[in-house]
Image: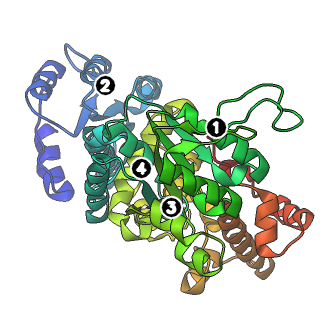
Amino acid sequence: MLRLLKRSLEPDLGCKVETASSGEEAFSMIQEKRFDLVLSDMKMPGMGGAELLRQIRALKQGIAVIMMTAYGSIDSAVEAIRAGAYDFIAKPFDHDTLVFRLRKALERNRLISENIRLHNAFQEQATFHNIVGSSPAMLKVFETIRMVARTDMTVLVTGESGTGKELTCRAIHAQSERKAGPFVTVNCPTVPEQILESELFGYRKGAFTQASSDRQGLFQAADGGTLFLDEIGEISPTIQSKLLRVIQEKEIKPLGGTTSIPVDVRIIAATNKNLAQAIEKGEFRQDLYYRLNVLPLRLPPLRERREDIPALVSHFIHKHASTMGRDPLPVSDTLMDLLRELPLTGNIRELESLMMKGLLFAKGEMMEPEDLREVLAVSPGVVSGDRAGTCLKGLPYKEAKEQCLKAFNGGYVGALLEETGGNVAQAARRCGMERQALQQVMKRYEIDPEPYRRKD
């Protein structure tokens, strides 16, 4: 039987097959060489299949094990599955069934190995502050971060929503001489103008009705470190003028105060807004723009670095698997190819959300397109053009229409919420709708603003 299996499986599977006449011999070979798969009988003289499985699992080499068992011993095979065997096959079996099972196991093992390789590659690069990427576009970003971190100049980080602007700003701070100092984040669009001024510069007792005591501002809190101004394109002209003075004079004046306070703060700003266009419209001060844009850094969207998607997928799966009570799942080639083609207008944030949903919905031992069928149907741009016929083929007209509407609203409203940090009122103003009307659309198409809300 061993000789027959070796002769037939090697050409059919296209791989090297080695045989062992006992469990002890097999385990000795496994300790000396790297194997991807073990096909073992359950009952053998000496070490049985269950004990061999236990010892193989103890090595933690990720070897897939398939057990062969007699038809009347299915219960023992089920126990083997519970103990960690990948599959079992009942004897007598036909050759095609065996080859199919082995191919499936080898494919799964290949995907797991690739997943581990990508994760290990990421871990090796983790010294670059958890920024994942090895594409030419990201290598250029890393080099720019190293360059600007050596200086103490103001930095403006630009890029679409979800490209990792805050993570990049933290990397600049962590590599700078200010790394021992505080890193203070201000999410500008989420703070009303009248409050933002007092938050940044502080205030003196009696400056306004509720000012019952002096309060230190965020500039003072960041003294000796870095102040990160997220979405700076959204601040008002009044705050712009005061911010310009701080950059120029290196001092602040709290609300209600009469004297200025010197501050030693490096400012790093980020925006997904085109500030050059905002200047033309009179929405942003040109002199402030030039002060901020001393060292510009643009983050590429995922469509310009698609070769990084497999590594990002692996990173997010390992990041969230344990918190969701699952082992890290490999991703099928079909799903990976689909992820590479998706528009992913939400960039890294959207890809991370997809992987979390995939971990939640996956029913098998690897993540497949079917596990994300409902989610992918509402991804912006997936159901459009020539792809629409493929995605919606076989659906009744009414259901297909509803899927298209769901895709459009998910993409359109989702993009608005990305831009506004989950602020429904701002999103409604930008698209010319009443807030209540937009909320009704969000309720109908199950669009939750919470994932879009940024945390300080």
Q: Nearer the viewer, mark 4 or mark 1?
A: 1
> Is tag 1's residue or tag 2's residue first in the polypeptide sequence?
2
Amino acid at pointer 1? Thr
- Please name the residue shown 76% across and 71% down the image: 430
Confirm whether residue 373 shows in the render.
no
Q: Nearer the viewer, mark 3 or mark 2?
A: 3
Q: CA distance from mark 2 to mark 4?
A: 54 Å
Where residue 160 sits: x, y (%)? 52, 65
Judged from the image, the secondary structure of the residue bearing numbered disc 1 is loop
Dots 3, 1 in contact, CB < 8 A: no
- Residue to which mark 1 is pinned: 259
Q: Nearer the viewer, residue 416 or 154?
A: 154
Q: Which residue is mark 4?
A: 168
**Residue 64 in which image quadrant:** top left
Structural distance between the alpha carbons of marks 4 and 1 = 35 Å
Circle 2 residue: 42
For label 3, the crowd category at 10 Å Cα-Cα, with few meaning under 14, some 14 to 19 and many 20 or more, is some
